[in-house]
Amino acid sequence: MSAICDPASYDRGIPHHLFAPLRAAPGLAWIDPSPEHGDHTGFWAVTRMADLVTVSRDTGTYSSALKHIQLYDVDEDVRDVRASMIDLDPPVHTQLRRLVSSVFTPRHVARYEHAVAERIRGLLDAVEADGGGDWVTMVAKPIPIGVICDILGVPAADHGLMVEMSDHLVAGTSGEPLDPTAYGNTTPLRELPFNSPAAFGIFDYARRARQRVLDEPGDDLLSALAVAEVDGRRLTEVEYARFFQLMIFAGNETTRSAMAHLALHLAEHRHAFDAIAPDRAGLELAAEETVRYSSPILYFRRTATTDTVLADTRVAAGDKVVMYYCSANFDETVFDEPMRFDLTRPRAPANCAYGGGGAHYCLGAPLARLELAALIDEVVGRGLQVEVAGPVEYVRSNFVNGIEHLPVRVHR
Ligand code: HEM
């Protein structure tokens, strides 16, 4: 069993001691099968930045559509029913991404800036009034889900349900057995994203939301997607539901993790935060360093479509190639003192927390950057001191670097 597949290895965050030797060794690292953690075949671990960028940008050689983008393979007969655009290759991927890309450009997301800041102020007021609490529950969870739900047009009363179902998706990467009947699920788990019954709940919600917005369209993304066309036809109910599930998961879980890790950094490096240039550029660098250091998505996987050579290593058609963002973001040949948390670290060379570039580069990166900068701005601006007040509980997963609970004390 390989330690880098074991969710328990991530119980205290990124296991840097496992990745450093893999980066230092020449070629790609071969990781032996670890069936108990979802990997039955073994895989090539891509741990250095240059190799990760090569894989990310070459969708012809390294496919997202073959087999799966996580460690475990998805059977061919159910691949189509599970796939959202992140599981597809160009040109189909390109067609689908075009339907939503204009909503997530930096210029377009800037229109949410005011609402995001407002939401953050309200949540920080509440945690400050209590003198602290669980930073994850009170701050990190509600911000991103609230923002993405507003963009989608999910009513506020359902935000809690979205958080719960999204958490339950991630539970599919914990290695623990899930109740197959949860959320009224009747679909075999192998047909559902993350093998989680919560995907059934999210799909079911999406079907009802689609009908609602077709009857009463609003000025939101769910309404726009309901009438959007690909090749002269509307999305099917299933395609629509998969889009919804991707947005709910991707727009929520990742940013939340970065915001939870931010609290740990605020507690440890307060002086550095106080020294941030109080302008947009300074805040953006701080947000970027927070996301590099936390690497909320630990890895994504591709499958080689053909025999090829990467890092002087022969990769055969059908081999799994796994890009460890959480390793490449600490590549000593790219970053000066990578283990140092440096809020003034220059933007170039770029980190790969949002991907190594190419077709699948994080659609929501401009939104996540805006949310993180707004949170840092508000905490620093109001002079809020954050102290860790109890044990930090990480999400048990070999896929996301999440924090479940983070008790804090806050004061000015
Ligand atoms: C700190 C926050 C975030 C991190 C670290 C993150 C990370 C990533 C990564 C690593 C990828 C895969 C890139 C690749 O395969 O090349 C990705 C894709 C994606 N992200 Fe994010 N993400 C974040 C926030 C968001 C937000 C707020 C949204 C909101 C919509 C979002 C939506 C997506 C979507 C839809 C994709 C799939 C894009 C595609 O396949 O074309 N992400 N993200």
Image (cartoon, rainbow, N blue to C red):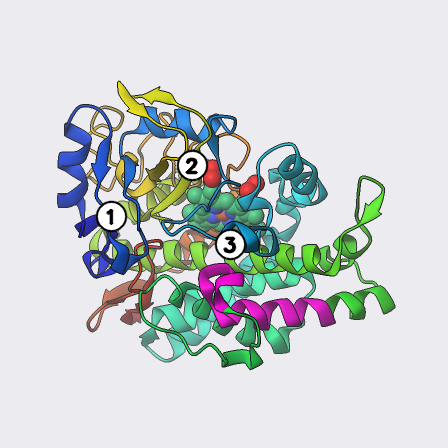
What span is in magenta?
Answer: 189-208
Question: Which quadrant, please, contains the C terminus?
Answer: bottom left
Q: Residue at x 52, y 26 (%)?
A: 60
Respond yes or no on whether mark 3 lies under 8 Å from ligand 1: yes
Q: Residue at x 62, y 38 (%)?
A: 93
Left or right: 73, with 225 as reference point = left
Q: Which residue is tagged 3?
A: 250
What element does badge 1 sit on? loop
Q: Residue at x 50, y 80 (%)?
A: 181
Q: Nearer the viewer, residue 347 or 101?
A: 101
Is residue 96 among what the camera can see? yes
Task: Indicate yes or no whether the magenta region holds residue 342.
Answer: no
Q: Which residue is tagged 1?
A: 33
What element does badge 2 sit on? strand
Q: Where is 80 relative to 385, above or below?
A: above
Q: Which residue is tagged 2?
A: 303
Q: Where is 180 relative to 32, above or below?
A: below
From mark 3 to mark 1, how far is it between C-alphas?
A: 28 Å
